[in-house]
């Protein structure tokens, strides 16, 4: 990947196109502030799905999907209108997921997508577990839905929009908020 000078950000940034899965080898080149156009498979899961997964882990049950190297998008997608792949889908505020994240990181969760700043503890977990936190711009849910090729419920369907959804995306625009080196987009000058 080529780094480009971005004078507005005050330093070097990268714009890249990446395909999932986001392996440790792929995320090692990302830095906070980088722009990523992500394609491939991601999984939508919010609070209720996370709580159920953690409950199943505590009970020694197998999770409904392999967490290793996946990207979880904190989203509750709207129903698809006729002729569309997806309804509006925008990121939810991620900080409330912080206390639910480490058990999944221990299983290899490599990337999370949400909006807003997260706790210092979560930023440190990104370093420890070699994971990245990506942010999607809030308020553009209709536009983001145009980057969805397909969406389907894959687990916990009884939770409705809070179920786990497999989402196929193409050139989904994101920013790297926290990288694996401790970089923090919210502290850049």
Image: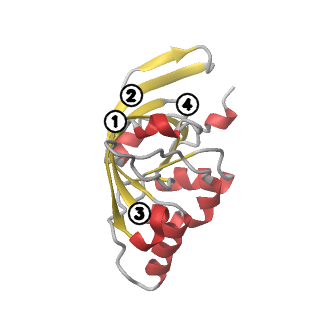
Of tags 3 and 2, the one toward the viewer is: 3
Which residue occupies 51% across, 40% down? 141
Q: Secondary structure at mark 1?
A: strand
Q: CA distance from mark 1 to mark 2?
A: 6 Å
- Where residue 80 sits in the image (x, y, percent)? 39, 49
Q: Are marks 1 and 2 in contact (CB under 8 Å)?
A: yes
Q: Is residue 137 above or below residue 69?
A: above
Whether residues under marks 3 and 4 lie with C-beta atoms below 8 angstroms apart, the answer is no
Vertical position of residue 163 compared to residue 60: above or below: above
Q: Check if mark 4's residue and mark 2's residue have beta carbons within 8 Å.
A: no
Q: Residue tagged by mark 4?
A: 33
Mark 1 or mark 4: whose residue is earlier in sequence:
1
Look at the numbered discs 3 and 1 and tell me whether their residues touch, using CB distance below 8 Å: no
Mark linked to residue 18: 1
Q: Mark 3 or 1 closer to N-term?
A: 1
Check disc 4 and report its element: helix, strand or loop. loop
Q: Badge 4: few (under 14), some or many (20 or more) residues near its Cα, within 10 Å?
A: many
* Mark 3 vs 2, N-terminal side: 2
Dots 1, 4 in contact, CB < 8 A = no
Label 3 crowd bin: few (<14), some (14–19), many (20+), radius 10 Å: many
Residue 111 in view here: yes
Residue at point 64%, 59% (across, down)? 96
Tally of numbered tags: 4
Q: Give the label on residue 164, or none.
A: 3
**In the rendering, at what x and y percent does residue 112 appear?**
48, 50
Between 164 and 62, which is closer to the camera in this rendering? 164
Disc on the earlier residue, 4 or 2: 2
At 58% from the left and 20% from the top, the residue drawn is 11
Q: Is residue 8 shown above or below 43? A: above
Mark seen at residue 101: none
Circle 2 residue: 16
Q: Dot 2 lies on which element?
A: strand
């Amino acid at each position: 990947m080529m780094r480009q000078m971005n004078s507005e950000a005050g330093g070097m940034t990268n714009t890249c196109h990446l395909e999932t899965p986001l392996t440790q080898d792929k995320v090692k080149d990302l830095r906070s502030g980088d722009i990523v156009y992500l394609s491939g498979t991601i999984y939508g899961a919010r609070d209720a799905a996370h709580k159920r997964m953690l409950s199943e882990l505590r009970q020694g049950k197998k999770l409904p999907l392999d967490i290793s190297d996946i990207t979880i998008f904190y989203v509750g997608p709207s129903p698809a209108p006729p002729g569309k792949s997806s309804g509006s889908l925008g990121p939810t505020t991620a900080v409330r997921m912080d206390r639910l994240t480490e058990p999944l990181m221990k299983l290899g969760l490599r990337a999370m997508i949400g909006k807003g700043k997260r706790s210092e503890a979560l930023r440190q977990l990104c370093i420890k577990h070699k994971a990245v936190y990506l942010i999607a711009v809030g308020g553009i849910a209709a536009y983001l839905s145009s980057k969805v090729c397909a969406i389907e419920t894959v687990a916990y369907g009884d939770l409705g929009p809070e179920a786990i959804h497999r989402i196929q995306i193409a050139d989904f625009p994101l920013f790297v908020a926290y990288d694996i080196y401790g970089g923090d987009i919210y502290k850049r000058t």
